[in-house]
């Protein structure tokens, strides 16, 4: 079997998605997600110009060799654009391998380690009262784990609070919108949110929170400590992680578990975090961290150090990534949780999939490969729309992390 075509499909059913389609001379095809929110066309160009021509004529069964060819062979290693492109190829090749074998991807990895994949949904509101109502809605939908975010008094907008309560899309303007941030206001408000959640709902659900890279390590230590009575499942991205050693400071001050890694793209981004046991959950994903092949290496390093997986699963990762992630999650022994921000019905129609939600768990289904396809005719009706993620400034105008 040989790769006969390699095409990039960009569509926007409510938000932008980049999908790689790999076709073979025997009629089997596979697809991979290549979406990098706000930077979609850079990955599309990388794939079209530098990857697709080199794949034609290769044996699609040689997944490891093709991965190494694209990673080592690029000379310019790592980075979100390169690694998302490699991920798309890798995901499409695993999809083909599954279809050829007639087996769902999780069976190729070693079979299921669990019966279902526990996911968390996103409860958010402009204030604590609205967020509580949303927590109640997710609990009613059967979720065992719920992420909670709320607007901060005195700040006009905040990360994680959506216009539409169910479908969150932060990349909402062609030129990035500017938000204003105050760490002091945030740190005073957040414990009140979790106090309210635990007093209304008790401790039955796992509750999570995303700090979205906004604190310094010592501030994150303070937040983690102040949230200890509410026993969070995790505190996510408390501080930017370019300086991995910074997490030592957080660890010295709190036992609130820490999750990090949605913006990481290789094992080297989390080597210190994992090997020094500075985090509890690694959030690298199929699409941004080099596909199933590389995610497996990260998870297996993590397993040595009691770190569990908690893959990113925002709406800007396409259903193709979600499908592949669920096979990975069903298999990987040191699984923690999977993020599940629902896609809109428009997106689901473009990407028919075998995965399904029941009682707080997702299951990847039994279709061969990863079980997600693309309806190209429908995709063509939703053309690309330029959109950027917001930026953040402090109240005095200095740029800050969004
Ligand atoms: C999450 C993430 C997202 C990101 C988004 C950026 O935890 O789901 O932080 O909300 O902001 O994926 O494109
Ligand atoms: Mg996050």
Image (spheres, grey):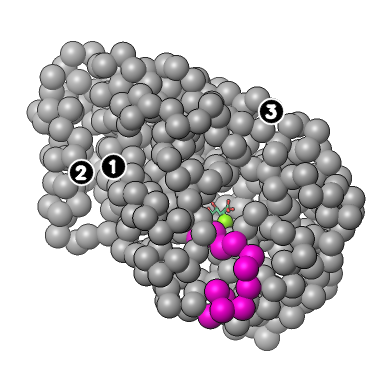
Q: In this view, does 256 lie to the left or right of 292?
A: right
Q: Do the residues labelled 1 and 2 touch (CB within 8 Å)?
A: yes
Mark 2 CB lies closer than 8 A to ligand 1: no
At horizontal 76% and vertical 38% (from top left) the residue drawn is 138
Q: Where 377 sits versus 305, above or below?
A: above
Q: Nearer the viewer, mark 2 or mark 3?
A: 3
At horizontal 89% and vertical 50% (from top left) the residue drawn is 200
Q: Mark 1 points at which residue?
A: 293
Q: Which mark is residue 359?
A: 3
Quarter of the rendering occupied by the N terminus? top left
| Residue 178: percent from left, percent from top | 63, 68
Measured Cα–Cα span from mark 1 to mark 2: 8 Å
Q: Is residue 156 visible?
A: no
Compare marks 1 and 2 and give the one earlier in the sequence. 2
Q: Name the residue under label 2.
A: 67
Q: Give the range drawn in magenta.
A: 249-260
């Amino acid at each position: 079997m040989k790769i006969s075509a390699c095409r990039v499909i960009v569509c926007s059913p409510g938000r932008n998605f980049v999908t790689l389609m790999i076709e073979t001379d025997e009629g089997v095809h596979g697809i991979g997600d290549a979406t990098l929110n706000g930077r979609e066309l850079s990955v599309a160009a990388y794939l079209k110009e530098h990857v697709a021509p080199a794949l034609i004529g290769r044996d699609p069964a040689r997944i490891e060799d093709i991965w190494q060819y694209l990673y080592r062979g690029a000379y310019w290693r790592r980075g979100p654009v390169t690694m998302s492109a490699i991920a798309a190829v890798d995901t499409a090749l695993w999809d083909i391998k599954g279809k050829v074998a007639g087996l769902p991807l999780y069976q190729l990895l070693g079979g299921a380690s669990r019966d279902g994949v526990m996911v968390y949904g996103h409860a958010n509101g402009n204030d604590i009262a609205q967020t509580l109502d949303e927590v109640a809605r997710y609990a009613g939908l059967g979720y065992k784990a719920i992420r909670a975010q709320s607007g901060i008094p005195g700040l006009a907008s905040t990360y994680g609070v959506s216009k539409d309560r169910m479908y969150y899309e932060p990349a909402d303007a062609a030129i990035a919108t500017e938000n204003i941030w105050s760490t002091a206001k945030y740190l005073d408000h957040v414990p009140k949110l979790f106090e309210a959640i635990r007093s209304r709902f008790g401790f039955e659900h796992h509750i999570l929170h995303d700090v979205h890279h906004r604190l310094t390590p010592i501030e994150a230590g303070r937040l983690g400590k102040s949230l200890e009575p509410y026993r969070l499942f995790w505190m996510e991205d408390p501080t930017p992680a370019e300086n991995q050693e910074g997490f030592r400071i957080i660890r010295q001050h709190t036992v609130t578990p820490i999750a990090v890694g949605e913006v990481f793209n290789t094992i080297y981004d989390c080597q210190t975090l994992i090997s020094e046991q500075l985090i509890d959950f690694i959030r690298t994903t199929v699409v941004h961290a080099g596909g199933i092949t590389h995610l497996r290496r990260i998870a297996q390093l993590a397993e040595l150090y009691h770190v569990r997986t908690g893959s990113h699963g925002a709406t800007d990762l396409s259903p193709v990534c979600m499908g592949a992630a669920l096979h990975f999650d069903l298999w990987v022994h040191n699984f923690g949780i999977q993020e599940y921000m629902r896609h809109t019905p428009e997106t689901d129609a473009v990407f028919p999939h075998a995965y399904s939600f029941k009682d707080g768990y997702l299951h990847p289904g039994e279709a061969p490969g990863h079980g997600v396809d693309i309806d190209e005719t429908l995709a063509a009706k939703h053309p690309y729309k330029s959109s950027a993620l917001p930026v953040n400034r402090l109240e005095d105008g200095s740029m800050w992390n969004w």
